[in-house]
Structures are given as structure tokens and as C-alpha cells.
Amino acid sequence: MYSFDSKKKEADVFDMGAVAADISKSVNVSNAKASLKPNGQKKEISGKSASGYDMEVTMDSAMGGNQEMMMTVTLSGPVWIVPNAPGAADYARFYKAAVEKGWIFSDPRAAKAQPGQAKAMAEMYHQIAAIGGIPYETDMQIKMGGGGPMGAMLAKLGNVTMTTTTNAVEVGALADDLFAPPAGYKLTTKK
């Protein structure tokens, strides 16, 4: 993964396999619980008819890999999926394969700081991909908690809301140069 700084013409380079392996030391995915249930609602989003689902993903995570700093990360909220949307088959293939390889879908620095949140987000995408459509809107509540004083602090600091909306989907081949850093950028490999 490349993380670009266009002002400095620099890019940090991350080996996502190594990042995933590092994060897996802090997250116990065997205790993960995920559900994506139809709620019977329909909604028009960007000119498409979307079906409503209620999502909840719960995962245990140890801050910095320290098992004494265990916390629970929960993602919950409605997801609006357009079934059989253009590109849905590609979307499903990508996310299923990526999650099976342990990939995460956020900046590696943020994922290392909040490994439970990163893995829970990956599981959310995996669950959505299994439906056979594309999420045109999500409204996720991300909550963290745990036992003792640390749990109380996380409950106050870790609650975040994330809303995404898809405006349009284009289907077609992408040029290889879209996946490479621009000429002249300084590349720095990160661990």
C-alpha cells in the first residue's frame, strides 16, 4: 500500500501482508461475532433501490498486543445494499479474497493503533460482500470498551460514527499506472 504526501512528493510503502500479520498478534478473530440481517426497509440512493440490513460486528483486541489491555470493538448500524449493482461480482471477489488473506482497509498506522477496529471493518466488508451487492450507504457506530478503568476510558474516547455514501459506480478496466506512485516521488518502506 502506498500512502502519498503530494506536497512533499513522497510516499510511504507498506507491505500489507506484514501489517496484517502484525495486527493479528493483537486481535483474537476466533471470538469475532458478525451478523448482517435484513431489516425489511428499502431506500433510494443515487438512483438505485437499496435494501436495508442491520449490521453488528464484535471483536476482541489487545492494545499494542498487550493481553492485559484487552478491549472489545463493536461496529453496528444500518447498511443499505444495492443487490446485483454494476460491479457487484468484482466487489464481492475482491473483499472475500482480501479478508481471507488478512488484509485491512485503512491506513496501516491507524490500524496498528486500533487493530480491533481495523479487523472489525474488514469483517464488515466480508459480510457485505457475501450478500452479492454493493453498499451504497453505511452508518456505522464504532464503540470500544473493556474492563476496569481502561475500559471506562475507551468507552468515552473510542465511540466514533462513520457514514459513507456511494454516488456512482463505474465498471471497467483500470490502467496499471493507477496502482503505481507518480514519477519523481521518493519512496520510503515502512514496517
Image: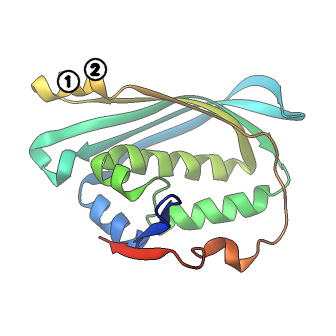
Left or right position of 176 against 87:
left
| Residue at numbered disc 1 | 153
Q: Is residue 58 shown above or below 88? A: above
- Foreground: 10 or 122? 10
Residue under the point 30% across and 54% down: 112
SS label for mark 1: helix
Left or right position of 116 against 69:
right
Image quadrant where residue 186 sits: bottom left
Residues under numbered marks 1 and 2 in contact, where contact means CB atoms less than 8 Å apart: yes
**Badge 1: residue crowd in 10 Å (few <14, some 14–19, many ≥20):** some
| Dot label at residue 156 | 2
Residue under the point 43% across and 64% down: 102
Left or right position of 142 against 174:
left
SS label for mark 2: helix
In x, y percent, where is residue 144? 31, 31
Quadrant showing the C terminus: bottom left
**Badge 2: residue crowd in 10 Å (few <14, some 14–19, many ≥20):** few
Left or right position of 32 against 176:
left
Q: Is residue 129 shown above or below 117? A: below
- Foreground: 39 or 46? 46
- Foreground: 3 or 155? 3
Which colour style is shown? rainbow
Mark 1 belongs to which amino acid? Met
Mark 2 belongs to which amino acid? Lys
In x, y percent, where is residue 101? 47, 69
Question: Looking at the image, which residue sits at the far right?
Answer: 47
Residue under the point 36% across and 49% down: 110
- Foreground: 165 or 93? 165
Real-space CA distance between mark 1 and mark 2, rounded to the nearest whole angstrom:
5 Å
In x, y percent, where is residue 99? 51, 61
Q: Is residue 157 shown above or below 92? A: above
Residue under the point 42% across and 28% down: 160
